[in-house]
Amino acid sequence: MRKQIAAANWKMNLTAAQAHTLTHALCTSNPAVEDNRLVILGVPFPYIPMALSVAGATKGFAIAAQNCYHKKSGAYTGEVSVEMLASMQVEYVIIGHSERREYFNEDHAVLAEKVNLCLAGGVKPIFCCGEPLSIREAGTQNVFTETQLRESLFHLSAEQLTGFVIAYEPIWAIGTGKTASSEQAQEMHAHIRSVFAGQYGATVADSISILYGGSVKAANATELFGKPDVDGGLVGGASLVAEEFTTIINSLQ
Ligand code: PEP
């Protein structure tokens, strides 16, 4: 059975004290997340040691970095490698968030390199995809999103994609308060799964957790997560508030 996941993306928010208070509150409100459910906290790099020490012992919690560099090691001042993350027991890393694609010009090829390094280094990618508003308005979102997946992931083997995590995040719904309807989310998630099924077969496709991201909050999580191909969410703003994110965790199916 594929995992149902509530993943937080704190982005560049919170002081160290606030991050500690939030992590502690989440762990004490959710002391035992059930077996096929998983909470992932995507924290800024400086807070990784704190998050590992506070949440590390809480069942069903894992820590993610929000990025990694696309080279193995070397003279890349200010960057963080997959090897560094792995050496700290960081289990996940968010790859290809639309903000990184847009502000840091991360293209399909760079993202493929990051994914390769993650898989070789034992850190699991949470691979983000999703279309801007202009593409949604033109009705070409399926082809657009499929291309993102094909160009950065389809060189991988079936084994490497088994249990993989994808986050579908329509850019027009990120941080805007505008959520895709649960029908729009289900339609795209089913499409993404069918694309993987076409390339790798139904067993691999059914093992992939496809998270929805874009203004998920306590009030809409149950409806979104109730759709058969929506396996949880990647949550920005609402993951910064302990009660909101706890309700989102409890909305996992
Ligand atoms: C995100 O940044 O991944 C995201 C989905 O943000 P928000 O929930 O704030 O829309």
Image (cartoon, rainbow, N blue to C red):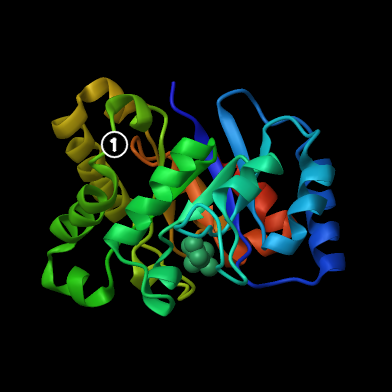
Is residue 240 depicted above or below 94 in this figure? below
Q: Tell whether circle 1 marks a residue whose Cβ is less than 8 angstroms from ligand 1.
A: no
Of 119 and 29, nearer the camera is 119
Q: Where is residue 171 in the image (x, y as percent from the top left)?
A: 36, 69
- Marks counted in the figure total 1
Q: Percent from the top left, x then y, of residue 180? A: 35, 61
Dot 1 alpha-carbon crowd within 10 angstroms: few under 14, some 14 to 19, many 20 or more = some
Q: Residue at 37% of width from left, 76% of height from top?
A: 102
Residue 101 is at least partly visible in this image? yes
Query: Left of 60 or right of it: where is 119?
Result: left
Where does the N terminus fall, quadrant-wise? top left
Q: Measured along the vertical axis of the image, is residue 232 above or below residue 138?
A: above
Q: Which of 18 and 124 is in front in this view?
A: 124
Q: Is residue 37 above or below residue 128?
A: above
Residue 198 placement (x, y as % from top left): 14, 32
Please tell me in which quadrant of the rendered image residue 205 appears: top left
| Label 1: which secondary element | loop
Amino acid type of the residue that numbered disc 1 sits on in the rendered structure = Leu
User: Residue at the location (64% across, 72% down)?
Assistant: 12
Q: Residue at image x 87%, y 66%?
A: 17
Q: From where the camera sits, is residue 178 visible?
A: no
Give above or below for 75 relative to 153. Answer: below
206 horizontally vs 163: left or right: left
Q: In this view of the protein, which residue sits in the foreground, 28 or 97?
A: 97
Q: Name the residue under label 1.
A: 156
Residue reaching furthest to the front: 75
Q: Residue 230: x and y, percent?
A: 39, 42
